[in-house]
Amino acid sequence: MKHALIGSLAMSSFLLVSMSAATAQHATLTETELMNQLRDAAPAEIIKDATILNMDAAGQMKPIRTGTNGWTCMHSHGVPMCADAGAMEWAKARTAKGPAPQKLGFIYMLKGDQGVSNTDPHAAKETADNNWITTGPHVMIVGAEAKNMMKGYPRDAKADPATAYVMWPDTPYEHLMFPSK
C-alpha cells in the first residue's frame, strides 16, 4: 500500500509539472537545494511532515521522503509548492484533460509563480492573446467543489493578481487564487 501511494504521488506530481516532451528541460536539484527552495513555500508544519518529491534530469518526480500528513511538496520548473491530496488529484486531471475531481484541494505557493495563462489551463508559454499573469505569494483552492465558493470573486481574463480572483474562468479547472501578501 505504501509503495502504491508513493507511486501514485510521484505520477500525480509528474503530471502536475509535465510540459511538452519535446521542449521540456529539467533542472536537477540536490536534496539540500530542494529543501532550501521549499523553505517558506508553505507553512513549516506542512513541509515538516510532507512527502517530498524531486525531479530528476529526465523530468520524472521521485520521492525522497515519504510524508505522514497527506501533503506533497516539490519544486517544479522554478516554482516551489505544496499540495494536498485533493489538489494532486485535480492537477492530474488537468494535465490529462480529464474532468475536474469533485473534492476540494489546496495548494500553497508562498513564493509565487513564474506566470501562466489566465484563460488556457494548458498553455505552455505566453502568447499575445492568452492573458499571461504572474501572481506573487498565493494559495489556491481547486476542484469542482471550489466552484461553490467563487460567487463574487472577479472572473476577468485580465485579472489583478494583487487581489483574489478566479483563474481559468469558465473551464473545468477554474479555481480561486488568493494572494497572501
Image (cartoon, rainbow, N blue to C red):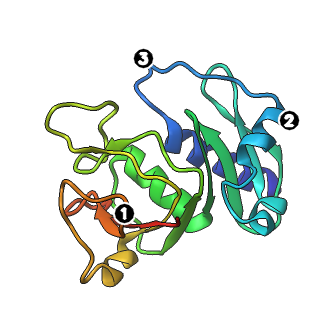
Closer-to-camera residue (115/169):
115
Q: Earlier in the sequence, mark 1 or mark 2?
A: 2
Packing grade of label 1 (10 A; few <14, some 14-19, many >=20) is: many
Picture layout, residue 62 above or below residue 165: above
Please identify, in this view, whether the residue under mark 1 or under mark 3 is nearer the observer. 3
Q: Earlier in the sequence, mark 1 or mark 3?
A: 3
Amino acid at the residue labelled 2 = Thr
Amino acid at the residue labelled 3 = Thr
Q: Secondary structure at mark 1?
A: loop
Residue extending furthest left?
129
Residue 31 spot, x, y in % from top left: 84, 35
Query: Residue at coordinates 18% horizontally, 62% vertically from top-left?
Result: 156
Please give the residue where the numbered disc 2 appears in the rendered image: 32
Please give the residue where the numbered disc 3 appears in the rendered image: 23
Left or right relative to 162: residue 114? right
Please identify, in this view, whether the residue under mark 1 or under mark 2 is nearer the observer. 2
Left or right relative to 70: residue 166? left
Please identify, in this view, whether the residue under mark 3 or under mark 2 is nearer the observer. 2
Calculate the distance from the C-alpha at mark 1 to the C-alpha at mark 2.
34 Å
Please give the residue where the numbered disc 1 appears in the rendered image: 100
Closer-to-camera residue (158/172):
158
Packing grade of label 3 (10 A; few <14, some 14-19, many >=20) is: few
Calculate the distance from the C-alpha at mark 1 to the C-alpha at mark 3.
26 Å
Asked if disc 1 and disc 3 are in contact, CB closer than 8 Å, the reply is: no
Query: Residue at coordinates 77% horizontally, 54% vertically from top-left?
Result: 51
Q: Secondary structure at mark 2?
A: helix
Amino acid at the residue labelled 1 = Ala
Left or right relative to 40: residue 105? left
Query: Residue at coordinates 67% horizontally, 60% vertically from top-left?
Result: 42
Residue 157 spot, x, y in % from top left: 18, 55
